[in-house]
Image (cartoon, rainbow, N blue to C red):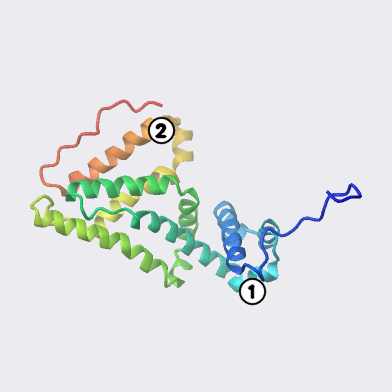
Amino acid sequence: MDVGGKPAPKTRKTSWKKDPAAVKEDILEVATIAFAAHGLSGANINEIAAKTETSKRMIYYYFGDKEGLYCQVLERVYASLRSSEDKLNVAGLDPVAALRRLVHATFDAHSNAPHFIRLVMIENIHNADYLRKSEIVPQLNRSIIVKLEEVCARGKAAGQFREGANALQLHWLISAFSFYNVSNKATFSASFGGALFGRPAQEQLKAQVADMVLAAVVIGYDPVAWGADQSD
């Protein structure tokens, strides 16, 4: 507040001239929330600009247009999810333990990334038209397949995994369980109640998902996570 008792003018959070990377990241962060909530058509560039304390002109300077901003938001959320998986070192683990850890990590990563889930759902409405334009996302997604291929190869060599164990199929299975847990939370809860979404029940579901994936590829695997209490 100034000496005249009037509020001091609001200053920008960051200066595009002094720190353009910070401004760009701020725009992407706000745009992620906007696109996840309203989709590509519903998100408003003027509202995004106001919340980032920048300008529509500056957003277009960095991203070209609204679709360019949306594409970079997609790349950013994919990069964030893959980064959490890449940090997981399973090379020194027994193949069965390594696969279990990868399942648990993917389940948790999806649970912690609701914006990613919503944006993927929105992009599927667009038939992945914008994702196909990205040269970055296929490279990002390759990393988890490579990690699963390595685990499968070690499991087969040790005589623990079935010869038909396939990294891409495993990724599909793991992603399907993990994605549905977040994407359909609202409708599932409305239909059947929210008992499965409390912390104890989520931990139990995560263990059961790992059991189902392991049972599909590990020779003689005996599931251990079934039958426990699933209440909140």
How many residues crowd mark 1 within 10 Å: few (<14), some (14–19), many (20+)?
A: few
Q: Position of residue 126 (x, y in %)?
A: 49, 63
Q: Position of residue 10 (x, y in %)?
A: 77, 55
Picture residue at 29% right of the left edge, 50% below the top: 102
Q: Secondary structure at mark 1?
A: helix
| Residue located farthest toward the right when viewing the structure as drawn | 4
Q: Position of residue 151 (x, y in %)?
A: 20, 56
Q: Position of residue 41 (x, y in %)?
A: 60, 61
Q: Dividing the image into 4 quarters, which one contains the C terminus? A: top left
- Seen from the viewer's position, the closer of residues 9 and 205 is 9
Question: Residue 124 occupies which quadrant of the picture?
Answer: bottom left
Mark number displayed over residue 50: none
How many residues crowd mark 2 within 10 Å: few (<14), some (14–19), many (20+)?
A: few
Picture residue at 38% right of the left edge, 58% below the top: 82
Type of amino acid at the residue the image marks with label 1: Tyr
Type of amino acid at the residue the image marks with label 2: Arg
State left or right for residue 88 relative to residue 97. Answer: right
State left or right for residue 209 relative to residue 49. Answer: left
Please tell me whether residue 57 is drawn above or below residue 36 in the rendered image. Answer: below
Sooner in the amino-acid sequence: mark 2 or mark 1: 1
| Residue located farthest toward the left when viewing the structure as drawn | 159
**What residue is pinned by disc 2?**
199
- Seen from the viewer's position, the closer of residues 132 and 143 is 143
Please tell me whether residue 135 is drawn above or below residue 193 in the rendered image. Answer: below
Question: Residue 214 occupies which quadrant of the picture?
Answer: top left
Q: Secondary structure at mark 2?
A: helix
**What residue is pinned by disc 1?**
61
